Image (cartoon, rainbow, N blue to C red):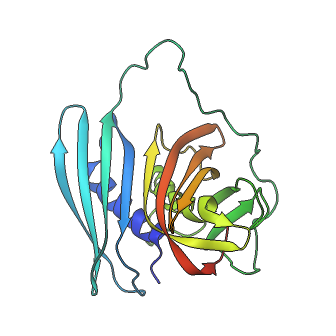
Amino acid sequence: MLHGRLLGGLAARAIEERCAEPGLRFARLTVDLFRSSPMLPVTVETTLVRDGRRIRVADATISTDLGVIGRAAAVLLREGEQPGGEQGVVTPAWDAPPPSGPPVDGGVWTPPFDLWRLSGRDEPGAGRVWMRERHPLVDDEPITPFVRAALAADFASPLSNSGTDGLRFINADYTLTLARVPAGDLIGVEATGHLSADGVATGQVTLHDTAGPIGFCLVTALANAAPLGGR
């Protein structure tokens, strides 16, 4: 079926194609996943919601022959002078060096991207991975840094919501926030929180590139009776 990462990536691509401008930085992308869809042609329609001097907001609607299957909203913010002084809380760079060996291959699930696990599959503790896209999202078109981040962000759900017996939650959305877009093709994802009660969950991850942390992703999820493949 069409996975959420593809829908988010296509929405990010369409909004970037219409709204990108030097000096405006993609700061947030929220992707709502309404329903599953088989592998059908996808249409993405964008709407410019606000076009201010410092803030630009755009929406995207994602459809197939089944109707609307998802939507997205992006916020672009104007770059400016960085304030002085020290922040009260600063997310540290993680201690995971860039991968040097081959990515995981085969097993229970072979991902459609290169994946290096830094934590054991379905083991207690925070999930941590490096990932890298190996296929173009659109034929003969390079993946931009913003789209690369949007594709990686969907991995927040399995990474933050997996348990020791697999993934028992399926996410309904994800919200990616970025201080900057990734440099290079490697993105690190580290689970930094999970809460759940009565079959409803929320999870969060921190995203990194080889230079340091770049942003966060938050997901909401529903309990799924049968465990899916974990992180």
Which part of the image, by quadrant, shows the C terminus? bottom right
- Res 2 quadrant in image: bottom left
Q: Residue furthest front?
A: 198
Residue drawn at (28%, 86%), measured in percent from left and top?
66
Image location of residue 102, percent across then percent down: 79, 64
Q: Is residue 137 visible?
A: no
Residue drawn at (46%, 57%), measured in percent from left and top?
150
Q: Is residue 174 left or right of residue 203?
A: left
Residue nearest the observer in this picture, 105 or 93: 93
Using the image, determine if residue 100 lies above or below residue 65. Answer: above
- Res 120 quadrant in image: bottom right
Image location of residue 62, percent across then percent down: 29, 71
Q: Residue furthest top?
A: 85
Using the image, determine if residue 109 lies above or below residue 155. Answer: below
* Figure label count: 0
Residue nearest the observer in this picture, 204 or 11: 204
Q: Is residue 78 left or right of residue 133?
A: left
Q: Is residue 153 visible?
A: yes
Residue drawn at (47%, 84%), measured in percent from left and top?
1
Q: Is residue 200 left or right of residue 64?
A: right
Q: Residue furthest right?
A: 101
Image location of residue 6, percent across then percent down: 45, 70
Image location of residue 187, percent across then percent down: 61, 51
Residue drawn at (50%, 51%), measured in percent from left and top?
217
